[in-house]
């Protein structure tokens, strides 16, 4: 089992959530993940990471699988211009590789925002630290687990 997957499993256990981690083959896109678990694409909680242009830190936007982040709205929320986060920054901040960034189990604290669309569901699925593993959770626990602030940052 990978270190990333172990960290997510430990975060799930620490939060008192059921461990429903599933290996799904390939889930690099929201549609692949939704097809694998048999849910709507918007039930996939995507972890989109940007780099703060001034701070240089990674910033997390948790969004419904069918939605796209509006750069201007996201920048306004972050209080700084945002740019593309490269693989090295994502790995250093979160401990995850692109395609497997989980909303929990990060190596370092990260500022985060939550797409309110996710709250329309009783269950969503998120990456579990690898591009091949996902886990279910009630989206209402995400703000408490991640510190994410519910906000409008969608196109």
Image: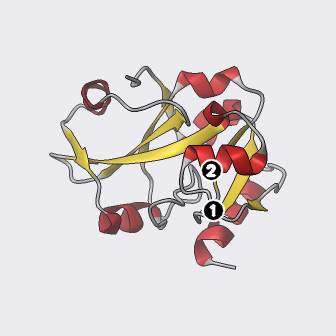
Q: Nearer the viewer, residue 126 or 104?
A: 126
The quadrant the C terminus occupies is top left
**Residue 26: horizontal and vertical position, in percent?**
63, 62
**Residue 37: horizontal and vertical position, in percent?**
76, 48
Q: Secondary structure at mark 2?
A: helix
**Residue 105: horizontal and vertical position, in percent?**
58, 59
Is 127 positioned to the left or the right of 54 in the image?
right
Residue projecting furthest to the left: 54
Q: Please tell me which residue is depicted at 63% across the width and 35% down the height of the picture.
A: 41
Q: Nearer the viewer, residue 36 or 143?
A: 36
Q: Please tell me which residue is depicted at 33% across the width and 28% down the height of the picture.
A: 70
Crowdedness near tag 1: few (<14), some (14–19) or many (≥20) residues, C-alpha within 10 Å: some
Dots 1 and 2: beta carbons under 8 Å?
Answer: yes
Q: Please tell me which residue is depicted at 59% across the width and 40% down the height of the picture.
A: 45
Q: Nearer the viewer, residue 124 or 114?
A: 124
The quadrant the N terminus occupies is bottom right
**Residue 69: horizontal and vertical position, in percent?**
38, 32
Picture quadrant of residue 30: top right
Q: Is residue 54 above or below residue 121?
A: below
Q: Secondary structure at mark 1?
A: loop
Disc 2: which residue: 32
Q: CA distance from mark 1 to mark 2?
A: 7 Å
Disc 1: which residue: 26
Sequence order check, earlier mark of 1 and 2: 1
Picture quadrant of residue 23: bottom right
Q: How is the image coloured?
A: secondary structure
Query: Does residue 55 appear anywhere in the picture?
Result: yes
Query: Does residue 144 appear anywhere in the picture?
Result: no
């Amino acid at each position: 089992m990978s270190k990333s997957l172990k960290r997510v499993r430990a975060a799930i256990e620490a939060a008192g959530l059921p461990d429903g981690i599933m290996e799904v083959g390939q889930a690099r896109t929201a549609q692949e993940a939704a097809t694998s678990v048999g849910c709507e694409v918007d039930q996939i909680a995507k972890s989109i990471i940007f780099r703060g242009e001034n701070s240089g830190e990674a910033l997390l936007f948790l969004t419904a699988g069918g939605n796209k982040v509006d750069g201007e709205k996201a920048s306004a929320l972050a209080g700084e211009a945002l740019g593309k986060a490269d693989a090295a920054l994502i790995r250093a901040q979160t401990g995850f590789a692109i395609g497997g960034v989980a909303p929990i189990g990060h190596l370092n604290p990260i500022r985060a925002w939550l797409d309110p669309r996710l709250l329309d569901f009783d269950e969503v699925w998120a990456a579990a630290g690898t591009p091949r593993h996902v886990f279910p959770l009630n989206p209402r626990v995400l703000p408490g687990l991640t510190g994410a602030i519910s906000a409008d940052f969608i196109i």
